[in-house]
Image: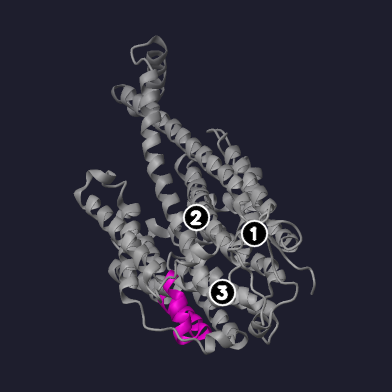
Amino acid sequence: MATAVDVHAPSTASHSVALPTSPPRATLAALPAVNPWIVAISVMLATFMEVLDTSIASVALPYIAGTLAASNSEATWVLTTYLIANAVVLPASNWFGLRFGRKRFLVTCVVLFTLSSFLCGAAPSLTFLLFARVLQGAGGGALQPVSQAILLESFPPRKRGAAMALFGFGVVVAPVLGPTLGGWLTDTYSWRYAFYINIPIGFLAILMISRFVHDPHYIRHAKAGPFDNLGFGLLCLWTGSLQIILDKGQEVDWFGAVWLRWATALLAVSFIWFILHSWNTPKPLVDLRILARNWNFRVCCVLIFLLGFVLYIQVSTVPLFYQEVLGYTALTAGIVVAPRGLGSMMGLPIVGYISQRIDNRWLLFWGFTVFGISSMMLSFVNLDIGPLTLLVPIVVTGFGISFLFVPIGNMGTSTVPNVEMGNATGIFNLLRNIGGSIGISVAQTELVRRACFHQSRLAAAVPQTGYWFEQNVERMGRYLGGQAGPVAGRSLALGTMYRALQQQALLWAFIDIFRWAAIIALSAATLSWMFRKVTFSQNK
């Protein structure tokens, strides 16, 4: 009879949860017949493709708008529609995996994602592109949780840290490579190749998954039960409302718009109803009762939300800083931030090796602390920095991230039974995506608001009738008037000084965002000690 891990038992002084010395029979039966590392590479390809596409399209938005005769605001729906469809499918992936078989469902999702990538690249209009992005989001939503569930079930608990390091390569490095690769493809060829790049990766993933991935016995003989139509409908309502509010809130001054207030009310009602329904229904689409049964998984959900929040703040704001403040092109900004991926690649093998040998809480504490310190280092930027000035904090950020994803997944899923792994990974990835969406929205909103705040403070501090101000306007007006005429010289001088004021105000707004991200990361470092210690066996 398999040995069970009782997470509800009274905890000891060290809050330690000891895993079985030898894997139980159920775990051994779930292990794949082929080399599990081949399985890991197979599912990592699918995850890498999906995460890469999340960030690669963001660089091409201005080009998409120009080609398809759309505004920049309309082009943002290329990202929004994808995220909405992605978020809806994420928690539902466990039911589809049980109903149709996890391997069959994963292959179907990869096929749909690859086909819709071709449709995105060939789109003749914005409407067609948005339709293709919905299909792409639906196919990509299940790739991460299903791939992660297959990966964790393919390895015994003592080897999951090393496997998660390989999986983390796809999740952590892909968002960093996305802007660089997308900028290069867009500048060199066309924005359409930012979608076409998924086709060869998708074909390789389909071949490897079909050949090497197999469903365990409890998936092959699982009874999924009837589909939770109400739960799925509520999930669509609150995730869709949340994404629309986050995407369009700043444009309509948030609660100044009547429709946004109604959308917020719909979000609140559908979200509360979804929680009550999922908690009280015998077989819900998303079983939230795992949060009550498993302390470590509850802590895991909080930390993965915070990680998504601060990670996507940096991923979105650092390239934007180089473009908006320093005037870099999209490709150049992508190249400058690419060393973050180098830091992650250096750290992932290390954390994969040591994650089963030391207390993972120390790794989490170290990772969040390093991330917070690197964010604080970014807050010392100025207008005179060069492309290599932030090289050290960018590399350090990537190194710190590598110490976060693996231990969070390791600590959160080590006490989750294999039969609940699909449900757990669906919730895990949903919270990371929601944390990232909220983080991006908060960062973009505060950039605008803090820039206005600093601009008003700077303007109030400059006496426009003062000697220094008039002297500089006169000197700059004479210089510019020599090229545009004496009448236009003063207007050009005032416009140049106003642009300099805006640039300085925007710089300080970025500094505020970096400092807030550092505070949140350092706070998360202290929360990592809320995990109960998990002891891994060193026996092979």
Amino acid on which the number 2 mark rests in the picture: Phe
C-alpha span from label 2 to label 1: 14 Å
- Identify the mark nearer the N-term, 3 or 2: 3
| The quarter of the displayed image where residue 228 is located | bottom left
Question: Residue 173 location, x and y as percent?
Answer: 59, 60
Label number found at residue 407: 1
Question: Residue 488 location, x and y as percent?
Answer: 30, 26
C-alpha span from label 1 to label 3: 16 Å
22 or 454, nearer to the observer: 22
Q: Magenta span has 96?
A: yes
| The quarter of the displayed image where residue 174 is located | bottom right
Residue farthest to the right, as pictured: 539
The region drawn magenta spans 91-116
Vertically, is 231 above or below 436? below
Give the residue pinned by disc 2: 305
Give the residue pinned by disc 3: 149
Main SS of residues in magenta: helix
